[in-house]
Amino acid sequence: MNTCTPLLALALLGLASVLPPTDATIVAGALLPHGDIALDPARDPALNSTQRRQATELHAAALQAGKFLQDASPELIFLATPHGVADLERHAFFLNPTAAGCLDPLPALPGGSGSATGATAATAAGAGAEGSAEAQLSPAQQQLGHPGRRRCTDVSVAVGTSVMLLKFLRDRTFQQTTGLSGFGPPGEAAAPFPLGWDELRGSARFLLLSFPSRRYNESVQMAPEVLDMGMALWDALEALPQRVAVLVSGDLAHTHDPAGPYGFSKDAAPFDAAVGRWADSLRADELLGEAARRQHGAKSCGFLGMVMLHGMLHRGMAAALDGAAAALGSSARGAEGQLSTSVARAGTGAPGQQAAGQRSLQEQQWPPADAGGGVPGTWRGRLLALQHPTYYGMAVATFERLGLQAVAVQ
Ligand SMILES: *[C@@H]1O[C@H](CO)[C@@H](O)[C@H](O)[C@H]1NC(C)=O
Ligand SMILES: *[C@@H]1O[C@H](CO)[C@@H](O)[C@H](O)[C@H]1NC(C)=O
């Protein structure tokens, strides 16, 4: 006899009103390809019909993710990138008041839309944050302008908040963290900090974190550290007075095609599939188990960004379940029983129990995807597209915070 179910449902319905007040909050997350043919499926004339259909699907999904972020109205966007100016050892925040990338024109392609080294589809999200009129245009239309014209875009960097995050992380024992300014003192340099390409835009201000270049050879070894850092960053970002969105720019396995620059690996397809299952379920074993085991062969530049996001979301999940269980108190024992099981499972991976980097990923015991059971404040992932129209795989996914409205207005 399952008498818990109605009680649990009732208790959950009541949760929104008993959750502790939340000033501002992490409102949304997304995983996006850097861009390239996801940004403009027409830009590579060598694609066959299948590949073009796949690229078009990614393109439409990136627009949808941009709309999703726009609807969350973030004031700050935290972006973790594997392709920034990088320190060899340390994670680096960019500390110029502006950052900018440029998109070089290509000679006009047949059909007219010239493009270059690929503006990231993160741009689609930024454009989404900028305004609905612009979001109506395809990213290609927004970005590429006219063939022959070089386009550069400045975005605003929240320097003070970045310095605060940097200090926060260092206080939390993440000594391998630094800040970088270019061409002038932090917060004062007039010139924009260089970005890889024209990948960001929008009226939100950015917190830009660049992974160190040791990630090229050591991303799997770095995963425990980055996971813990994600959990710490959750605490810091969640405590900010602004609404924050978290954006991971990254592509999947780069070893799909024997003729591609990284050759073929049998790990490529299973890696991408595991990432797809992770994005839909937030199951730790998919990302920290299966994908991590395949990462060496897959050579994904997005792996660490996803690990960081995973740390953030699960820290948030554990906090929400803790709060929910506490709020229920003794008045709903049946529900409490179920919730506290979830909380116990969620708590297993709580930060601070072990020093960063000391436990293996396989030892991580994270709650399964349904551990939150729809509790407000927990997260739901949604995979919108997963394809490899070229030698590398790409995924578009959104991450929604459940019951945000109820949580946010308390
Ligand atoms: C398109 O190219 C891919 C990769 O070479 C190949 O697997 C696929 O069969 C091709 N599809 C068509 C319709 O030619
Ligand atoms: C990664 O390893 C390769 C091969 O051992 C080496 O040539 C390269 O310098 C290393 N890169 C970094 C950033 O450590």
Image (cartoon, helix red, strand yellow):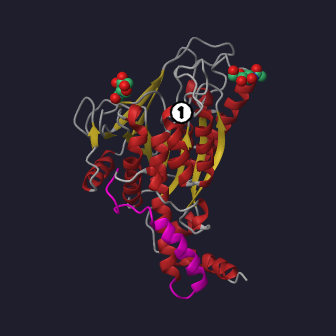
Picture coordinates of residue 253, whole percent (x, y): 56, 33
Single out the residue that lies furthest toward the bottom. Answer: 331
Q: Residue at x 58, y 66 (%)?
A: 371
Quadrant for ligand 2 reads: top left
Picture coordinates of residue 75, whole percent (x, y): 45, 51
Mark 1 crowdedness (10 Å alpha carbons): few <14, some 14-19, many ≥20: many
In the image, taking residue 338 as reference, residue 174 lies left or right, namely left
**Taking 176 as reference, is 356 above or below it?**
below
**Is label 1 in a helix, a strand or a loop?**
helix
**Taking 207 as reference, is 323 above or below it?**
below
On the question of residue 175 being in view, the answer is yes
Q: Nearer the viewer, residue 63 or 148?
A: 63
Instruction: Identify the image quadrant of the N terminus.
Output: bottom right
**Taking 46 as reference, is 235 above or below it?**
below
Q: Residue at x 45, y 68 (%)?
A: 22
Q: Residue 260 lies in magenta, yes or no?
A: no
**What residue does disc 1 label?**
298
Splitting the image into 4 quarters, where does residue 222 fall? Answer: top left
Q: Residue 354 lies in magenta, yes or no?
A: yes
Splitting the image into 4 quarters, where does residue 213 fall? Answer: top left
Q: Nearer the viewer, residue 14 or 138?
A: 14
- Bounds of the magenta segment: 329-357
Q: Is mark 1 within 8 Å of ligand 2?
A: no
Q: Nearer the viewer, residue 159 or 292?
A: 292
Picture coordinates of residue 131, whole percent (x, y): 57, 43
Picture coordinates of residue 149, whole percent (x, y): 52, 17
Q: Nearer the viewer, residue 109 or 289?
A: 289
Q: Residue at x 36, y 48 (%)?
A: 225
For badge 1, the amino acid type reads Ala
Q: Residue at x 32, y 51 (%)?
A: 165
